[in-house]
Amino acid sequence: MTATLAPDKMKANQEKFCGREREFAYKFNVGSQCFELTVPLKFPVQENPSNLHGRLMLLHNLPCFIESDLKESLNHFIEEESLRDYDREAEAALEALKSGEVDVHQLTSAWAKTYAETTLEHARPEEPSWDEDFADVYHDLIHSPASETLLNLEHNYFVSISELIGERDVELKKLRERQGAEMDKVMQELGKSLTDQDVNSLAAQHFESQQVLENKWTNELKQSTAIQKQEYQEWVIKLHQDLKNPNNQSISEEIKVQPSQFRESVEANGRIYEDQRKLEESFTIHLGAQLKTMHNLRLLRADMLDFCKYKRDHRSGVKLHRLQTALSLYSASLCGLVLLVDNRINSYSGIKRDFATVCQECTDFHFPRIEEQLEIVQQVVLYARTQRKSKLKEPNGEFYITRHSNLSEIHVAFHLCVDDNVRSGNITARDPAIMGLRNILKVCCTHDITTISIPLLLVHDMSEEMTIPWCLRRAELVFKCVKGFMMEMASWDGGISRTVQFLVPQSISEEMFYQLSNMLPQIFRVSSTLTLTSKH
């Protein structure tokens, strides 16, 4: 039993028993000779026993065969002596309580205060954060008659950003054209009145001018999106408060927005994306050993970024194709997408740059900008990789996650790190890319992501080496592995129905698409309809 004194008595009691030196003695034999190691230790021992043991071995040049026994003896000695001190301190505290040296009321008050502060049951509840408050308010409004108003307002902000981006692109284009003309003139004089050094100097000036202009527009867009986000969130909070007031007569007008009020974005800059022709096949399957779970599978020929890009329906005017995405933003039915990237966490090239460009076309009113999220990932990824390399010998399938509310059909992007090995034809089920898919599906189970889109061939673009046999082998491998992972899901989440979309590049032929479509039901054993007839 450990008793706690009032602060002044406690301090005096600790000084009485702490700071004492005890001598640790250890005997061992080397051949026929007997040795004894004695070390004075001050209690309580502040140093880690393992570190102390290592220093003793090194400083005294002790033989390696006593290492384990010395460590065990040292730990045992420190533990026993520490317990003796605790017992002496507890006995002294009880004696002080019995003799009346300690005020019982003061002691019980101190105990009650400490217990309340350290026990969760009695702790004060944490104040909800602004993000949590805003999430609750938005969820209420998006499921109310004000939902169309929210989406319309978001679209107006989208148009403003699109116009800024259009102006940026025009200005950058003019600069590059002017610089191109200047470079052409210089190249014509190369070897006559100008040297290679003159060309290099002009190229450096051009690069610096482009950087200055790009930085100017980057800062302007960043400032504009920050202002939009603040205005939007304040407006949402105000609207929610007004809706709670039944006497407010202006609400009906506040949430009413006429189609004529919308501004059309300029299409001359080519920034409005048109839907391209897609091929699609859908299947229903049941997986599980005893209790089977129904899942929906889809095979699509489409660009991965089609699920991210803002779209407009020209037949019905300016309408967003993301109502369902907005309704499920704070729900247990999230949508995810797998992007194949290299292991450099940035947005400078390839699919990473294209994805970041789409993210920047509309303000994200709920989550940090894509650049900010990547910076956070960069801060922790080096440490995480170091830990994994020291503990795991097998492929682990690295990926990182970004969250979005401003994309047309997804909430979560899984950035799966792959290398050029995925373009070869010899990967196996233990390849890091395949293991990464398993890890991603596990995250889907633990974080309410019920729809996930996966690149079936583990590539976003086709190349010459990707022949028909190559495509069939790769698709069979991914189909079989995903099927196995989905069967594991039942043990991860108890069996929740999900939608898995397998995407193939748009450049794949229709013939190849339908071969893959025929393969899918053979591997997953698609459910078929059974018609029962009665005999007369």
Image (tube, rainbow, N blue to C red):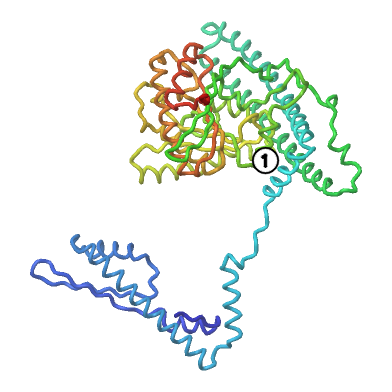
- Measured from the top left, where is residue 460 in percent x and y? 50, 22
The N terminus, quarter of image = bottom left
Q: Residue at x 76, y 22 (%)?
A: 265
Closer to us: 63 or 420? 420
- Measured from the top left, where is residue 67 in percent x and y? 23, 62
On screen, residue 231 versus residue 468, left or right, reads right
Q: Picture quarter containing residue 46?
A: bottom left
On screen, residue 346 versus residue 267, left or right, reads left
Closer to us: 192 or 263? 263
Residue furthest front as drawn: 536
Give, as a three-letter code, the residue at label 1: His
Query: Relative to 234, does residue 167 appear above or below in the rendering?
Result: above
On screen, residue 186 versus residue 63, left or right, reads right
Residue 511 is at least partly visible in this image = yes
- Measured from the top left, where is residue 499 in percent x and y? 55, 32
Closer to us: 500 or 495? 495
Query: Relative to 420, does residue 149 appear above or below in the rendering?
Result: below
Q: Secondary structure at mark 1?
A: loop
Q: Residue at x 44, y 31 (%)?
A: 483
Badge 1: how crowded within 10 Å, few (<14), some, or many (20+)? some
Residue designated by label 1: 366
Query: Relative to 103, does residue 67 appear above or below in the rendering?
Result: above
Q: Residue at x 32, y 78 (%)?
A: 22
Residue 349 is at least partly visible in this image = no
Closer to us: 337 or 333? 333
On screen, residue 334 versus residue 141, left or right, reads left
Query: Relative to 398, does residue 260 appear above or below in the rendering?
Result: above
Q: Residue at x 76, y 39 (%)?
A: 232
- Measured from the top left, where is residue 316 in percent x and y? 77, 21
